[in-house]
Amino acid sequence: MRTLVLIALVGFAAQLVDGSLGMAYGVTTTTLLLAIGANPAAASATVHLAEIGTTFVSGLSHWRFGNVDWKVVAKIGIPGAVGAFAGATVLSSLDTDVATPIMSVILLILGAYVLVRFTVRGLPQARPGTLRWRFLAPLGVVAGFLDATGGGGWGPVGTPTLLASGRIEPRRTIGSIDTSEFLVALAASLGFLFSLGSQSINWGWVGALLLGGIIAAPIAAFLVRILPAQILGTLAGGLIVVTNVRTLLGLDALAGLGATGRWITYATLALVWAAAIVVAVRNHLTTRAAAEPTTEPEPAPVR
């Protein structure tokens, strides 16, 4: 029961981050499931089954708040579903001893990207324009494949890429990515069920993640307008990096590092993460101060 409560709380926190940033639900929850000993394919399958519900509620919430561009959802979501189904099939065919380090490395890279991206740059400003099929379709296939094989990746790949294009404002980028993820989660789940069967899935974990995510989804859709995304992204990225480094250090190949080497690694990561949070907070405060209008004091009346 304690494990289910923990998973539900992580699902809530992960959806709160994902709904506010357009990324990090999959990589955060998959990282947790791997940390408590889940099979990589089963972990990804569990997360994607829960995401069918969370992304539906999240997409509906974003739509109600006017955060969705349905043309973008169609252009990136359908190719993303194709990539996700293929990725689920590939991951299901890998041996656990091979899949665990591969998935941890993918998650580590994605977490480092999120950490650096939001610490240094935050969210860029949008420049109005048109996002075409020839740009969105390949992006969807790659992001969907990576999402299924890594247990997450749709948001970390799709959201920054759309933001970097500058053709859609941040809140509509996040809303559209979250909404289109429903198609990706559905396709990946079908791929895992066809390859693994339903007996490999811990349905209690699915329910716990789903419950936490559904509660958080409408809150996140509202907070996307007011939450300091740069700070939240730095926190999420650092957590993903630290957790997956822990997984990799537990592999037999790195056993020679010893307890001292592992603790030095953890201490170094903690210092880097703390420094990144400080930088993110300062950058956010600087950006907010620059955006606030300055008022000159009125001159004293001449007598």
Image (cartoon, rainbow, N blue to C red):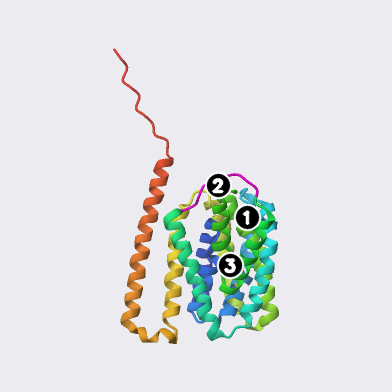
Is the residue 259 above or below the residue 61 in the image? below
Q: Secondary structure at mark 1?
A: helix
| x and y percentages locating residue 227 in the rendered image | 48, 52
Q: Secondary structure at mark 3?
A: helix
Sequence-wise first label, 2 or 3: 2
Residue at the spot x=56%, y=67% of the render?
A: 153
> Relative to 38, is 285 on the left or the right?
left
Q: Is residue 85 among what the camera can see? A: yes
Tell me the quarter of the picture where residue 197 sits: bottom right
Q: Which residue is mark 3?
A: 211
Mark 1 or mark 3, whichever is nearer to me:
1
Q: Secondary structure at mark 2?
A: loop
Mark 2 or mark 3, whichever is nearer to me:
2
Residue type, numbered disc 1: Ser
Q: Crowding at label 2, few (<14), some or many (≥20) Cα neighbours within 10 Å? A: some
Q: CA distance from mark 1 to mark 2?
A: 14 Å
Q: CA distance from mark 1 to mark 3?
A: 22 Å
Residue type, numbered disc 3: Leu
- Mark linked to residue 56: none
Q: Which residue is mark 1?
A: 176
> Relative to 274, is 145 on the left or the right?
right
Q: Are marks 1 and 3 in contact (CB under 8 Å)?
A: no
| Magenta-tinted stretch | 122-130
| x and y percentages locating residue 214 in the rendered image | 59, 63
Sequence-wise first label, 1 or 3: 1
Residue at the extreme front of the image, as rendered: 134
Q: Which residue is mark 2?
A: 126
| x and y percentages locating residue 90 in the rendered image | 64, 78
Label the magenta part by its dominant secondary structure: loop
Tell me the quarter of the picture where residue 121 sits: bottom left
